Image: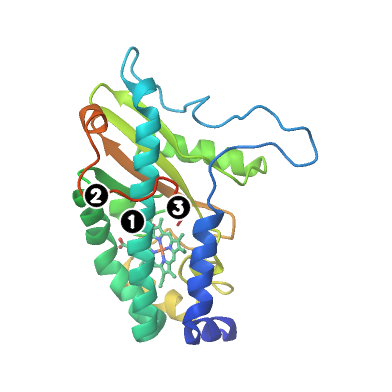
Amino acid sequence: MNGRFHRIRGRGILWLTLLTLGLAAAGCRRSGPETTPPSPPRDLTDFPPVESVPGAALERLRPVALERGRRIAAEAFTVLSGELRRALEAGGFTNAIRLCSVKALPLTRLVGDTNQVRLRRVSHRARNPANQADTEELRIIECYQEMLAEGVTNLAPVVVQPATNRITFYAPIVLNNPLCLACHGEPGSTLLPQAAELLPQLYPEDRATGFRLGDLRGLWRIDFTPESLTNASPAGAEFPAAAASPGN
Ligand code: HEC
């Protein structure tokens, strides 16, 4: 085992801190490079990569979709990273990979069900084929990747309404935590040897290795109906609006 991760595994506090930093680093608004005067905010909301239906409720409902989307994605992140932390504590990376492989999808679904939305974690390079991004999601991913390539580090979530009855929140998942590389990094370097050995057994079509810090790993996707955004918040979802941004 790689010495650095051996230490990480032994010191729960360290990777908990890394996870927290990762969450805090996920940002909200696109801004220009520091050396030039601030440019007007340009984010995917100004140039949505997915066309919205004309005359629909989007403009009015966007703020509530953003607020609720951020909160639900943050909640799902907390649930998944808590599970990861407990699994690492209980049995190290091999145990964590096994547990993730059976629990990640049901837990994500559960958070969606509790909030009465359809919640997904999707990727252009999915580990679990069930998380493979579709055409619409790939378009959003490409835009975020372009922004990252331009040096934008603070990517904002975006809300689109491609159909009358669907308002969708997307938030980028940027791989900004060294812990993620243990299971998503480069084979022979940042990817842990145990992960390199176990992952192909569980995921013969794994496409989710070879990532580097700062890469886009995927998206949170949350589908709302316009009616659900007009109504009061679902029970149990009364967290502070700015609780956290949906990182990874
Ligand atoms: C202990 C290993 C492990 C660590 C550490 C880990 N992941 Fe994963 N990740 C997995 C496994 C296993 C899956 C597949 C889960 C499934 O089958 O639903 C996965 C799936 C994902 C997915 C869903 C898309 C896909 O490829 O199926 C995203 C997004 C993701 N991970 C991001 C991250 C980020 C960001 C971090 C760091 C905070 C991270 N992961 C840390 C093992 C890990």
Q: Residue type at mark 2?
A: Gly
Q: Secondary structure at mark 1?
A: helix
Q: Position of residue 13 (x, y in %)?
A: 50, 79
Q: Position of residue 173 (x, y in %)?
A: 47, 51
Q: Earlier in the sequence, mark 3 or mark 1?
A: 1
Residue at image mark 2: 112
Q: Which mark is residue 168?
A: none
- Residue 197 visible? The answer is yes
Q: Earlier in the sequence, mark 2 or mark 1?
A: 1
Residue at image mark 1: 76
Label 2: how many residues lie within 10 Å, few (<14), some (14-19) or many (20+)?
Answer: many
Specify the quadrant of the image occupied by residue 61: top left
What residue sits 59% from the left and 55% below the top? 214
Q: Earlier in the sequence, mark 3 or mark 2?
A: 2
What residue sits 33% from the left and 34% below the top? 168
Residue at image mark 3: 244
Label 1: how many residues lie within 10 Å, few (<14), some (14-19) or many (20+)?
Answer: many
The CA span between labels 2 and 1 is 8 Å
Mark 1 within 8 Å of ligand 1, using the beta carbon: no
Q: Secondary structure at mark 3?
A: loop
Question: In the displayed structure, would residue 126 be above or below residue 222?
Answer: below
What residue sits 56% from the left and 84% below the top? 2
For this view, does 174 lie left or right of residue 38?
Answer: left
For the residues labelled 2 and 1, say whether their Cβ atoms are less than 8 Å apart: yes
Seen as rendered, the residue at the extreme right is: 35
The CA span between labels 3 and 1 is 11 Å
